[in-house]
Image (cartoon, rainbow, N blue to C red):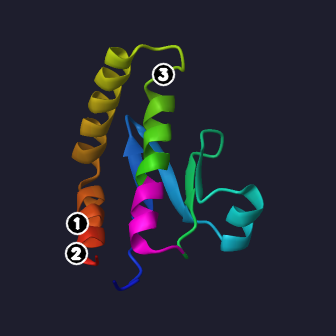
Amino acid sequence: MVNDPITLPEKVKVAGYNIAIKDWPPHAASASRRYGEFSANEMEIRIDMSMHSEKVLDVFLHELYHAVFWVYGIRDEDKEERICDQLSAGMSQVYIDNPDILRFINESREKR
């Protein structure tokens, strides 16, 4: 298994919001005890890119889902069916607006 770095897009559009994607220095990620985070206040997704490419993809998608949850107003008390409806609508729009995301996923898969 090769740990070739993968290249994240510089930003992702989520329902009209342009969210920057930043490389999070490993020391800052470690200090926060996280691999990545989404900040609605700063409109940023931060990812520790020093990880293996498979983990980078996993963390990126995790943080992207947080962004979709925030933009589409999904709450902890929502029922499973509403969550699935909103998440599928949100992710469909993300993939339509950001074709580079699917290329990024395929690039990550090819490096396995």
- Which stretch appears magenta? 51-60
Quadrant position of the N terminus in the picture: bottom left
Residue drawn where x is 30% and y is 70% of the image: 108
Q: Residues within 10 Å of mark 3 (few under 14, many from 20)?
A: few
Q: Position of residue 36 (x, y in %)?
A: 58, 56
> Would you name the residue on which mark 3 appears?
73
The image quadrant that residue 91 belongs to is: top left
Q: Report the predominant secondary structure element of the magenta stretch.
A: helix
> Would you name the residue on which mark 1 appears?
106
Quick check: 15 left or right of 41? left
- 57 up-or-down from 74: above or below: below
Label 2 to label 3: alpha-carbon separation = 34 Å
Residue drawn where x is 41% and y is 72% of the image: 53
Residue type marked 3: Gly
Q: Secondary structure at mark 2?
A: helix
The image quadrant that residue 90 belongs to is: top left
> Would you name the residue on which mark 2 appears?
110
Label 2 to label 1: alpha-carbon separation = 6 Å
